[in-house]
Image (tube, rainbow, N blue to C red):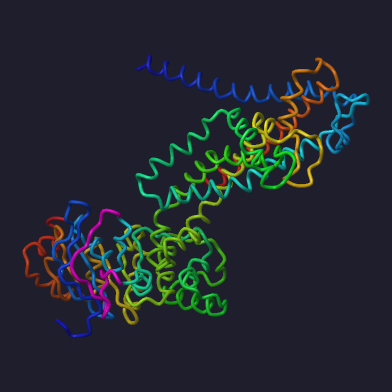
């Protein structure tokens, strides 16, 4: 399976919310410049695992993680790892579009600006590039000072993608990015994912099995906090090795 | 069923009546103040009344000019805002974003207790403790100054401003915070650049209501500010406020005298100021809700 360089390597990741264990010994290797989707029924731990990659679980007070997660050479869970630095390298897009109540321009420029970029023409270029990569530029180029809140849901989500791209991350995590969107907006974002993988490594959590089949090169199936099966999307969908995977994919539970 | 409808209907009517009562009360209070105060126009023309600086109601040749008192009130109130708002907003940020749960449970009631201290007690503190201290620190003969009153009012407006600002900060969607953190912004950068700016309209409402609270406060300013009816040149001068004047002089005027009318006109002016401030605050809240 290791046909290309590994971007993220998880070894024995377990996670607890207080007393409750949510992830059990997850080991997985995620490949560079590929889309990997994490699927499974609600509460199976796929989002929790996604949030391990950029340490967003730190925000939850009672959350505890054990095991090793490497991003290239960086030991993500190490005490010495600078979370700010990590999150610059690993961007995230959330379930509901969450643009700031600022202008389109300010939303995209926020990341670079907060990391110290003050040069207006450089920021202009970053905003242009990011919106372009998120396939939003043509729709908003005439009025970048418009409030982001006035965009449609799908546009907002692409703006959030642009905002994440603006800090030039290496990995983009997407937590059910289309669950609040209509089919047309969803299709646009799925198209976008195919393009994004040329430059970035994409990990997406999705409830939509067809979406996983459409967008991802690799699929990981989670069930009750355990990684049941992981492999090329085509193989997982055509010849699942595990009974549980097959049942989930054929809609017999989930 | 029908019986319940009837009961519901009666309750609906009753709440209607109660709601209208407050509006009627406000209108009546205003009319009362204005009609009682309008008599002053027979003795002082409006320009002098509002823009003159001589407040000498008991001299041989009495003058009823309110500007000194308006300036006095604004001085103390703005001083209180300048000192109190940063404290209150700082508290609100700390409580809503940073403080651990247990500390929040201790601090929040402590702030609320401030609102429950009788103002005469705060005034007493200003008179006996703070004023001598200020006179020592600044080397002035008396500590009963605008600064003394402003500092005490600053403490008094903290609960109002803090509570409303905290609500505003807490109602900022969690998604903004997560988005900012996920982009590698630190906790502090997130608070400064995303959370506080998003809560600004709500914080503004808190400041306005704090302003209304401060300008209407009577006992503290009466005890703390020295009550000299002179236009102050700085915060170390004594001032006389509108509220303090009404409270101090109303007991001794003859009903129907020019002085009596003048005091009512002060009350009317105060009413208009605080009504205006509340109106702006309400407008902000409405705009926020849209």
Q: Is residue A200 magenta?
A: no
Residue drawn at (42%, 64%) of the image: B186
Residue drawn at (53%, 22%) of the image: B16
Residue B265: give x, y in percent of width and height.
78, 27
Q: Is residue B275 visible?
A: no
Residue drawn at (72%, 30%) of the image: B244
Q: Quadrant of residue A77?
A: bottom left
Instruction: Relative to A155, say whether B234 is above or below.
Output: above
Who is closer to the viewer here, A142 or A24?
A: A24
Asked whether, in this view, residue A52 is left or right of residue B128, the answer is left
Q: Quadrant of residue A40?
A: bottom left
Query: Residue farthest to the right?
Result: B61
Asked whether, in this view, residue B161 is left or right of residue B259, the answer is left
In the rendered view of the protein, which quadrant contains the N terminus of chain B? top left
Residue drawn at (81%, 41%) of the image: B231
Residue B153: give x, y in percent of width and height.
62, 38
The residue stretch that appears in magenta: A61-80
């Amino acid at each position: 399976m290791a046909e290309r360089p590994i971007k993220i390597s998880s070894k024995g990741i377990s996670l607890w919310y207080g007393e409750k264990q949510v992830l059990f010994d997850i080991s997985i290797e995620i490949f560079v410049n590929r889309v990997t989707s994490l699927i499974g029924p609600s509460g199976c731990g796929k989002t929790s695992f996604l949030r391990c990659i950029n340490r967003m679980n730190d925000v939850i007070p009672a959350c505890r993680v054990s095991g090793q997660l490497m991003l290239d050479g960086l030991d993500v869970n190490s005490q010495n790892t600078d979370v700010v630095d990590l999150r610059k390298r690993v961007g995230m897009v959330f379930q509901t579009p969450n643009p700031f109540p600022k202008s389109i321009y300010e939303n995209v420029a926020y990341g670079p600006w907060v990391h110290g970029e003050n040069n207006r023409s450089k920021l202009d270029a970053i905003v242009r590039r990011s919106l372009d990569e998120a396939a939003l530029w043509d729709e908003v180029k005439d009025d970048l000072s418009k409030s982001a809140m006035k965009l449609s849901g799908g546009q907002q989500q692409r703006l959030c993608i642009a905002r994440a791209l603006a800090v030039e991350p290496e990995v983009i995590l997407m937590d059910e990015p289309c669950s609040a969107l209509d089919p047309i907006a969803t299709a646009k974002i799925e198209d976008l994912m195919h393009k994004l993988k040329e430059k970035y490594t994409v990990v997406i959590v999705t409830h939509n099995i067809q979406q996983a089949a459409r967008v991802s090169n690799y699929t990981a199936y989670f069930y009750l906090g355990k990684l049941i099966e992981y492999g090329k999307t085509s193989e997982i969908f055509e010849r699942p090795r595990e009974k549980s995977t097959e049942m989930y994919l054929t809609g017999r539970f989930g | 069923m029908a019986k319940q409808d009837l009961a519901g209907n009666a309750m609906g009517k009753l709440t209607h009546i109660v709601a209208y009562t407050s509006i009627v009360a406000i209108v009546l209070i205003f009319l009362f103040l204005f009609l009682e105060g309008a008599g002053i126009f027979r003795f002082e023309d409006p320009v002098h009344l509002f823009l003159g600086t001589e407040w000498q109601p008991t001299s041989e040749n009495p003058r009823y000019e309110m500007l000194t008192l308006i300036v006095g009130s604004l001085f103390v109130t703005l001083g209180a805002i300048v000192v109190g708002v940063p404290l209150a907003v700082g508290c609100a940020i700390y409580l809503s974003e940073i403080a651990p749960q247990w500390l929040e449970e201790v601090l929040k009631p402590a702030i609320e207790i401030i609102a429950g201290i009788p103002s005469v007690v705060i005034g007493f503190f200003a008179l006996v403790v703070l004023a001598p201290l200020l006179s020592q620190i600044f080397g002035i003969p008396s500590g009963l100054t605008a600064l003394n009153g402003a500092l005490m009012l600053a403490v008094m407006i903290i609960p109002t401003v803090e509570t409303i600002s905290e609500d505003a900060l807490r109602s900022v969607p969690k998604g903004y915070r997560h988005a900012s953190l996920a982009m590698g912004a630190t906790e502090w950068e997130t608070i400064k650049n995303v959370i506080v700016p998003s809560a600004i309209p709500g914080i503004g409402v808190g400041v306005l209501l704090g302003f209304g609270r401060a300008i209407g406060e009577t006992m503290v300013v009466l005890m703390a500010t020295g009550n000299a009816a002179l236009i102050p040149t700085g915060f170390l001068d004594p001032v006389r406020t509108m509220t303090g004047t009404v409270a101090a002089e109303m007991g001794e005027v003859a009903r129907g005298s020019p002085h009596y009318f003048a005091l009512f006109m002060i009350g009317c002016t105060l009413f208009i100021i605080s009504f205006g401030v509340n109106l702006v605050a309400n407008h902000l809240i409405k705009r926020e809700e849209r």
